[in-house]
Amino acid sequence: MRPSLALQLWTVRAQTEHDYIGTLRTLAQSGCTAIEPFTLHGLSAKQVRLFADDLGLCVPAMHFGYTRLRNDLAGVIAEALALGCAYIVCAGVPAYQTVNEWLDAADELNNIGQHCIACGLQLVYHNEYDFVPMGETCGFEVLVNTLSPSLVQFELDVFCTAASGGNPLAWLKRLDGRLPLVHLENGEPGSDPPTPSTWLGDGDLSLSAIVHAAKKSGVQWLIVEHDKALPDPIVCATRSLNYLAQTIGLQRN
């Protein structure tokens, strides 16, 4: 089965902060069919679910901070269930400098994942710049080797992976069966500093190869994210979603 397409709302963060529901309406009118929120900007999950359903928007996953997952897991689970999410995404952990710190984070995530599974949800870890070497390993390698596949799966951010020294294609293959979500962003990950582009068709990463590898690894959702502040984020997001749907042949939900 081909992966479905969604948009990470960080792409339109300024717009959602100003008018959350209006932004969702504009995205839906532009052809977006699924979203991945990172905040609800003071609205309740039930309110957002009501509006999303009315607009035909699916909410397969939501990002939550590591601190909130540790301190308010019951609230996170309630919010995710009310939104109709299948996945709770840990947006990343602090930039730990030692293997022991990463091992402690893995233990914490396994524990959180166990509680999520008990409530019918899957915990997923989203990498940031986790591939910076620590001797012969890196933080992401520690997590992959330590996290229980049944308790915590992954959302590979291909741009952050490449920008911090990882090989997205190699990791897509290695995480076969453990990778329901992928974040797609393009640009110049090898520049100093790494420079995201304004749409997916422009950049050094081969999106067609990445999408092909994602399909083989069983990825269910390919989620567009533009980290760069854009002059018109909705236009850029729509262009990227259309590029994936029309040029690479992916399906909207």
Image: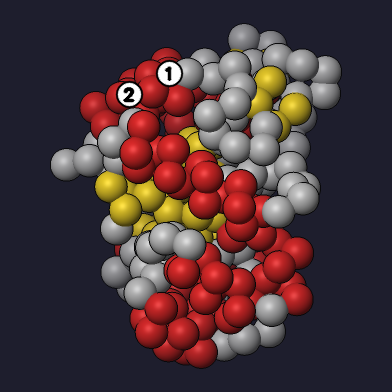
Q: Residue at x 52, y 45 (%)?
A: 239
Query: Residue 4: percent from the left, percent from the top?
Result: 31, 49
Residue 147 shows up from this direction: no
Q: Residue at x 67, y 53 (%)?
A: 233
The amino acid type found where label 1 is placed reads Leu
Q: Residue at x 71, y 15 (%)?
A: 190
- Furthest toward the top, the residue is 136
Tag 2: Cα neighbours inside 10 Å, few (<14), some, or many (≥20)? some
Q: Quadrant of the C terminus?
A: bottom left
Left or right: 43, with 250 as reference point: right
Residue sitting nearer the eye, 38 or 126: 38
Query: Residue 169: percent from the left, percent from the top?
Result: 42, 18
The amino acid type found where label 2 is placed reads Ala
Residue 213, which numbered label? Answer: 2
Query: Residue 35: percent from the left, percent from the top?
Result: 47, 62
Q: Are marks 2 and 1 in contact (CB under 8 Å)?
A: yes
Q: Secondary structure at mark 2?
A: helix
Reading the image, the residue beneath label 1 is 169
Q: Residue 84, located in which quarter of the rendered image?
A: bottom left
